[in-house]
Every structure is written in structure tokens, then in C-alpha cells.
Image (cartoon, helix red, strand yellow):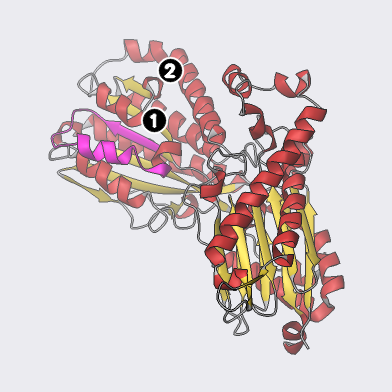
Amino acid sequence: MSKLETFHVTTIGASHIKDGKVCQDFALSGEGSDYAVVIVCDGHGGNKYFRSDRGSRLAAEQAQLAIREFMKTRFVKSQNGGKIVDNIQTNPDAFMSQLSANIIYRWREEIAKDYQCEEFTEIELAILSPKELAAFQTEEGWVSAYGTTLIAAVKTKDFWFGLHIGDGKCVTVNNAGEYAQPIPWDEKCFLNQTTSLCDEQALSRFRYYFGKEDLPMAIFIASDGVDDTFGTDEALHGFYKTVLQLFTEKGITEGVKELQSYLPQLSKKGSRDDISIAGILVRKELTKKK
Amino acid sequence: MNDLLATVPIPRRTMVLFFLVDTSGSMSGDKIGAVNEAIREVIPEIKDISAENADAQIKIAVLDFSSGARWLYEQPIESDQFVWNNLEAGGLTDMGVAFKMLNEKLSRSQFMADLIGSYAPAIFMMSDGAPTDEYMKELTELRKNKWFKVAIKVAVAIGTDANTEILKEFTGNEECVLTVRSPQALRKMIRFASVTASQIGSKSSGVGVNSSADSNQKAADFTKQIKDFEKENIEANDVQEGW
């Protein structure tokens, strides 16, 4: 019987340490009653995103809550004959759109609470340019201080989906050992530019993948500190192949520990950015490879 | 560190330095001689910058344009393997063709193939005249190219007949258009601009800056250094004459 296992690891970027900045990534992982979920959020690093560490944490937490709610209530009676159907499987487009909207809504509520509890300080505002300061004084200008990306992946025994806004990558591996990045890319994410939960049109920038066949035996999601380090898809997939090999040889628990301790080196030699990696693994498939 | 993970190869990021060189008939003699000499001399310095830079390696791509345009190599070449072949001057000034060919190569499927998550390029253009083809449409398209938008750009007007207005449109910043009036000044400018662009362009600044601020900052740093250099060297330009 296969079992879903999840993990997540995060490290502060080498350049963040050097500049005295906090880690702006946040990741989490867990299992629900019949599914596994992983989420990685990467708060933006520019001057005006000075609360993006809070933004990324709140985004991950609220996405987890939203996913929990949606997964719990996805079984509904069909219009004909009252048969119970799985909403996500019958209408994935609508499900994913509603889930995205719900995540945005929840996140905005939470950052608004944070902002109301603690207005921007003089120290936080001091680093802004006059133009940035002016933008902050508009009605919704403050939202960008919390700006973050978000990647979430959910897997059950029957399907999986990935939901994504911004940069970072989601890589899957199937039972044949083939690597893919099935979530469509957003061309607006280019070099250091990214779309964001704080964008006015954030809902339109979400993209997703839903799959019911050839389910992956491993799903990796990571912030752009990882794919910036490896540059090409070939190198990135090669890295994940090594990670899978590590998990197969050492077991997931020990493997995750070793991966965590490796991340600071990876950041130092590579992108120098914060790095977060999370994954859903099918244990049976992993142990088979032994 | 785990042995397995320690073996994972981490590629160096790449920055491409582009040279766009006018090799029309009017560049014959001292002008093209100065360009050839200057670029040949600066390659070892760029190689050193690349070797000493933990963040990135620098690759070089050269496009010369006269009647038509040609890439010196099919792909950008690593600076430690780059060999400069002297350019010869003759023909018209098909700047529009050059813009079109540059636009084609500034894409992920072409010269920017291994630059996912790497650095914006630096583009150095040199011309002594005005385009003899219909350049405007190609320049307009080039300026929409996202790699071109974020690139560090500098243009050198060689002599007083160069059309600096077009060069200003190319760089988008009149402070990055420099006029040189002698072979010595040209060599100095080529050396300074290409070394500075390489140093700034390959620097790992503000990691995680999720806006265009990173490329803007680099462009601002570059502009300031170019302006300072021009100020300090303007006397040399004034007294030296002629090609």
C-alpha cells in the first residue's frame, strides 16, 4: 500500500545574511484525511517589500486553510439524480479559480489585520524613495509591502494539482523517471521580475495544473532561489534526481535532515537567495527503487 | 555535507557582453584599426573579471554591420576561449539589419538559452555614421524585447559625423552615448565601457529584488561611472584630433 509523505526545508539566503536581512521564504507541508499538501511562498526582496516575510508566512498559512476547506467540501450532490461527485474532478477549472480567489481573499484579510495592528514604522518607510512613498499613500498601496509568490501542490490517490502565482518552480517525476514542469509558466516572471499575490490583478495571474492520469511519484516545489542556482531545467532536474536518490538510500527522514544542512551551501555557491524546497513523495514508489 | 549532494554540479551564472560594431566603408583606416586593437586588448581583462567573479562567467558575442550584418560566432563564447578576428571595413551602414538580428538572438531559444535566472546582458554599440537602411521599425521592435529592456546599454559615436540621436534612441539614455574624436580616445572608451559593463553586469546585487529595480540600479551605476569617466577624459578628447 503506498503512502504519501511530505517534507519541507528552508534556509536564509547567503546574501540576506550578509545584508542583515531576514529570510523571506516560508514553506509548509502536511497530510489531510485523504491528501497531502505542500506550499512554498517567497516574499519579495526589494526595499518596498519590507514585510514580505510576514506576507509569505501568512500566504502559506491561509493557502493551507483554504485548501483544507476546499478539499473537505469538494464532494457535492450532482444536479441529476443526487449522486455524490467530486467537484474538483468534474470541474477543475471552476474549483481552481475559486480556490485561488479564496486564497487571495484570506491573505488580504490577514495582512490587513497585521497592518491595522501595527502601522508602518518610520524606520520601515525611511528606506523608500519619494516615488515609492507616494505609492504607499494610495488606498491599496500598503499591500505591496507584504508581496509574495505562492506555489501549492496537493495529491490524493486519484489526482493531483499544482497552483502557482509568481516565480519558483514545480517539478514532477513519474514512475518512468520522467521529469516535467506541468504548471504553465507565466512569461511576466522574467529574471528578477515576478507576479505576486499583491498584484491588483492577482487572480488573473494564477495558473494551475490538474491531473488524474500518470500520477507523479514525486512532486517538488521550490522558490526561485533553487532554479536560479541551477539555471537550466536539465540541471534542476538533475538536482532533484540526486535528492530522490538520497531519500531512497537514507530514508526520507534522514534524507530531509541532510538536505536541510546542505541548503546553506547551495545558497552560498548558487543564487545566494533564500531557498525553500517542499515535496510530496509516494513511499511505495521510493522504496521500490531500492 | 552529504556525499551525494556534494557532487551536485552548480553551474555558474552567465552574463553576455555584446559588441555591435559599425564596419561600413567610412570606418576604414584608423577607426576600424582602433576598434580591432581596443577589443583585442580588452578581452584578457574581461577574462580576468570572469575568472575572479564567483557570481558569474562572462560570454562575448560580436555583431558587425555594414552591407548586411554578421555574427562573429554562432553562439556567445566564454571569455577565456574568445578569439578576436580583425574586422574589416567596407560597404553601407545597415543598422536596421543589425537591430533585427540582435532582437532575434535576444531570446531564450537563442543566445539567452542558458540564462534562465541569470544576468541581464550588456550591449556596447559603436558607429561613426548614420543608418543607410530603414532602421526605425527594427529599432522599435528591438526596444520591445524584454532582454534588451533590462540590458546595460552604451553607445559610442565615433567622430562627429555619427548620428547621436539614433544612438540615444538605442540606449534610451543620452548619458550613455559618448562621442570620441580620436583613435586613442576610442580605445580608452572601449576598454573602460566594456570592463565597467562586465563588472557591474555580472555582479550579484540585491538578490530577491522582485521588480525591475535590480536592472535599473545596475544601469544607474553604469551611467554614473561612464559620466565620471567622460568628465575626467574630456580634455583628452578635445585636444586630440582626427582620424
Q: Is residue A202 magenta?
A: no
| Horizontal side, residue A122 vs residue A223: left or right | right
Q: Which residue is mark 1?
A: B154
Q: Residues within 10 Å of mark 1 (few under 14, many from 20)?
A: many
Region of the chain picked out in magenta, as a range: B123-147
Label placed on residue A207: none
Residue B41: tell me if it is visible.
Answer: yes
Residue A175 placement (x, y as % from top left): 63, 84
Residue B120 placement (x, y as % from top left): 48, 42
Picture quadrant where residue B154 is located: top left
Q: Residues within 10 Å of mark 2 (few under 14, many from 20)?
A: some
| Horizontal side, residue B241 vs residue B48: left or right | left
Q: Which residue is mark 2?
A: B230
Instruction: Point out the tag, 1 or 2, that comes first from the N-terminus.
Output: 1
Q: Residue furthest front?
A: A81
Establish if A104 lies above or below A245.
above
Q: Nearer the viewer, residue B58 or A263?
A: A263
| Horizontal side, residue B127 vs residue B133: left or right | right
| Horizontal side, residue B20 vs residue A204: left or right | left
Considering the numbered disc 1 on the image, is that residue within a helix, a strand or a loop? strand
Q: Nearer the viewer, residue B176 or A179?
A: A179
Q: Residue at x 62, y 46 (%)?
A: B55
Q: Nearer the viewer, residue A282 or A274?
A: A282
Establish if B49 lies above or below A209.
above
